[in-house]
């Protein structure tokens, strides 16, 4: 039988395990920090933990790093895409985006996957094409960030991850318990200590889970993949809309804002001839204008199988103008890593051999 993944355990859970194997509780704190803060990938890296303690825990817990099969680096902006091989041979992709800032320290955002594949079948997305294979465990979600940290620290020992977005492969709210564990681990003061507001959960709109997230209220940033303000269009782009149509979704958003007092981000991928006309913009204004929200416009990224295209720059600008003139807060998403298929919606399950390594250095 497989052992539980050490990287997915909370400090409390680790303390219980220490007690069960006859170790003092404080050992849990030491081991937790080695794993979650320093990113230890092997038991013998834990220098201040006696060998007998490490051996006792190694008998009941699994600390294998997720294996990095391949990395690709964007020539355009330095975005890195990692292909990880999980213990059962399945693969997921994870993206590291680096933003340089003039005043505050640089931002390093990891876009993590929460599932192998996805069952939601959105019309524009590469991840959904092959359906869902399985949920990731909390340790596998957290492991993507920890292994990227280990990897980059070989070049830059000071490297830190400042933000995590649950926007990689999969629908995070379909893997709710593991999502919550991963959020709490990233946020842990003895771990990476990433503020809740720097953690963003993106969903295609699973209403009951949005309400769960409101009630559990981790104070993360919630992003809703809206993509249309009309049911007949959204039904086609985001099939989950047939289960939870716009009115139900917007009611859940209202509730979320009421309980958490947090602003929601609506993501809107602009698709030529589908959802990017002037009437679509006006419908979007009507749907969102009295909500505490901002809208993130993303010209749709190319996925060869979908046949969907982005609108012209003029149409995109006109769409944005209608929104901002109506007082809606918008941002245009900075495109990252599109030359290595690392942009939104381009992640998919791969075989190791399909990959091209652009930069042998990493
Ligand atoms: N499953 C979640 C999170 C992963 S997708 C969700 O759907 O929200 C992350 C974001 O990328 C979502 O807003 C999704 O709608 C968007 N997306 C998917 N495919 C895209 C594409 N080809 N171009 C632009 N955005 C895309
Ligand atoms: Fe799944 Fe999100 Fe892709 Fe839709 S956009 S298929 S929910 S990963």
Image (cartoon, rainbow, N blue to C red):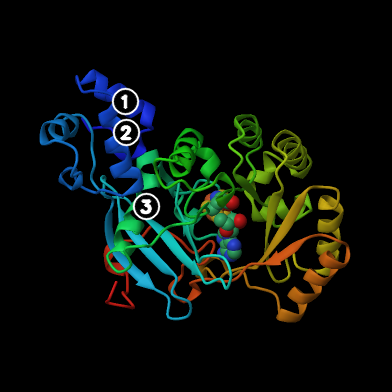
Question: Which residue occupies the foreground of this view, 210 or 31?
Answer: 31
Relative to 314, is 86 above or below? above
Question: Which residue occupies the foreground of this view, 318 or 349?
Answer: 318
| Image location (x, y in percent) of residue 19 | 26, 20
Residue at the (32%, 41%) spot, across then down: 33
Nearer to us of marks 1 and 3 is 1
| Image location (x, y in percent) of residue 272 | 70, 71
Q: Is residue 45 left or right of residue 72?
A: left
Which residue was labeled with disc 2?
Answer: 29
Question: Which residue occupies the foreground of this view, 338 or 215?
Answer: 215
Which residue was labeled with disc 1?
Answer: 15
Q: Is residue 310 left or right of residue 114?
A: right
Q: How many marks?
A: 3
In the picture, which quadrant includes the C terminus? Answer: bottom left
User: Label 2 crowding class (10 Å Cα cut-off): few <14, some 14-19, many 20+?
Assistant: some
Nearer to us of marks 2 and 1 is 2
Which residue was labeled with disc 3?
Answer: 144
Residue at the (81%, 51%) spot, across then down: 288
Cα separation, mark 2 vs mark 1, equals: 8 Å
User: Splitting the image into 4 quarters, where does residue 242 fall?
Assistant: top right
Assign a secondary structure to mark 3.
Answer: helix
| Image location (x, y in percent) of residue 205 | 65, 44
Mark 1 or 3, nearer chain start: 1
Relative to 261, is 131 above or below? below
Assign a secondary structure to mark 1.
Answer: helix
Q: Are marks 3 and 2 in contact (CB under 8 Å)?
A: no
- Dot 1 beta carbon under 8 Å from ligand 1: no
Q: Is residue 3 left or right of residue 29?
A: left
User: Label 1 crowding class (10 Å Cα cut-off): few <14, some 14-19, many 20+?
Assistant: many
User: Splitting the image into 4 quarters, where does residue 253 fall?
Assistant: top right
Relative to 96, is 29 above or below? above
Q: Are marks 2 and 1 in contact (CB under 8 Å)?
A: yes
């Amino acid at each position: 039988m497989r052992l539980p993944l050490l990287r997915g355990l909370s400090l409390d859970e680790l303390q219980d395990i220490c007690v069960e194997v006859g170790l003092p509780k404080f050992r849990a704190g030491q081991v937790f920090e080695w794993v979650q803060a320093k990113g230890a990938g092997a038991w013998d890296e834990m220098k201040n933990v006696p060998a007998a303690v490490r051996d006792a825990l190694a008998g009941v817990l699994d600390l294998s790093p997720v294996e990095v099969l391949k990395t690709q680096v964007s020539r355009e902006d330095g975005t890195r895409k990692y292909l990880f091989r999980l213990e059962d041979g399945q693969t997921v992709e994870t993206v590291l985006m680096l933003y340089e800032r003039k005043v505050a320290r640089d931002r390093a955002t990891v876009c993590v996957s929460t599932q192998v594949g996805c069952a939601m079948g959105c019309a524009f997305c590469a991840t959904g094409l092959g359906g869902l294979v399985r949920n990731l465990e909390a340790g596998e979600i957290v492991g993507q960030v920890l292994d990227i940290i280990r990897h980059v620290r070989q070049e830059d020992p000071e490297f830190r991850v400042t933000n995590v977005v649950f926007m990689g492969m999969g629908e995070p709210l379909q893997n709710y318990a593991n999502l919550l564990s991963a959020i709490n681990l990233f946020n842990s003061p003895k771990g990476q200590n990433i503020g809740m507001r720097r953690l963003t959960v993106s969903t295609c709109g699973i209403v009951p889970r949005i309400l769960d997230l409101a009630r559990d209220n981790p104070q993360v940033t919630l992003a809703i993949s809206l993509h249309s303000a009309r049911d007949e269009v959204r039904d086609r782009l985001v099939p989950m809309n047939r289960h939870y149509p716009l009115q139900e979704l917007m009611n859940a958003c209202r509730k979320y804002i009421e309980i958490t007092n947090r602003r929601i981000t609506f993501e809107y991928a602009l698709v030529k001839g589908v959802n990017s006309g002037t009437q679509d913009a006006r419908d979007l204004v009507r749907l969102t204008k009295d909500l505490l929200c901002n809208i993130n416009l993303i010209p749709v990224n190319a996925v060869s199988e979908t046949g969907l295209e982005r609108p012209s720059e003029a149409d995109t600008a006109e769409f944005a103008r209608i929104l901002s003139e109506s007082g809606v807060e918008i941002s245009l998403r900075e495109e990252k890593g599109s030359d290595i298929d690392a942009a939104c919606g381009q992640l998919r399950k791969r075989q190791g051999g399909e990959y091209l390594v652009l930069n042998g250095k990493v």
